[in-house]
Image (cartoon, rainbow, N blue to C red):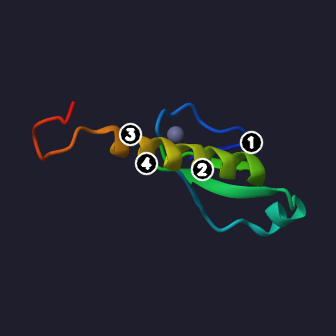
Amino acid sequence: MSLSLNRCSCAGAEYARITRSAWMRLFPSRRLYQCSECHARIFGLKKEMDALNWAMTTAKFFAAAAKPSPSGKSRF
Ligand SMILES: [Zn+2]
């Protein structure tokens, strides 16, 4: 498994925080993440990865909200 400074190109992936190695603590602005799709490990900037995860969560929320109601007939 490789370690990258940039995120992988998976669409719709979420990035879970995983435990850093000791040397990684020398880079306080970076955190270690693992892609939920390809399991690549990404030593990314925390603010960028947080923004990415936030965008993904928000996109899922709106996708769920946009689904047609299961109750049937539209009011319009
Ligand atoms: Zn990936």
Mark 2, Cα crowd under 10 Å, few <14 / some 14-19 / many 20+, is few
Report which residue position mark 3 lands on: 63
Please identify the quadrant where the C terminus is shown: top left
- Which residue is labeled 4 in the image? 61
Measuring from the top left, give residue 75's x and y in whole percent: 19, 36
Of 21 and 76, the residue lying toward us: 76
Which three-letter amino acid code belongs to the residue tagged 4? Phe
Q: Which residue in the protein does label 2 denote?
A: 54
Identify the element where label 2 is drawn.
helix
| Residue at the image position 52 percent from the left and 47 percent from the top | 58
Q: Is mark 1 within 8 Å of ligand 1?
A: no
Point out the tag, 4 or 2, that comes first from the N-terminus: 2
Q: Name the kind of residue labelled 2 in the image.
A: Trp
Q: Is 68 situated left or right of 34 in this image?
A: left
Could you tell me residue 50's position as x and y percent? 67, 52
Q: Earlier in the sequence, mark 1 or mark 3?
A: 1
The amino acid sitting under disc 3 is Ala
Disc 1 to disc 4: CB gap under 8 Å: no
Q: Which class describes the residues within 10 Å of circle 3: few (<14), some (14-19), or many (20+)?
A: few
> Disc 4 vs disc 3: Cβ atoms closer than 8 Å?
yes
Label located before the other in sequence (2 or 3): 2
Question: Along the line of sight, which residue is nearer the eye, 56 or 67?
Answer: 67
Distance from the alpha carbon under mark 2 to that under mark 3: 14 Å
Residues at marks 2 and 1 touching, judged by CB atoms closer than 8 Å: no
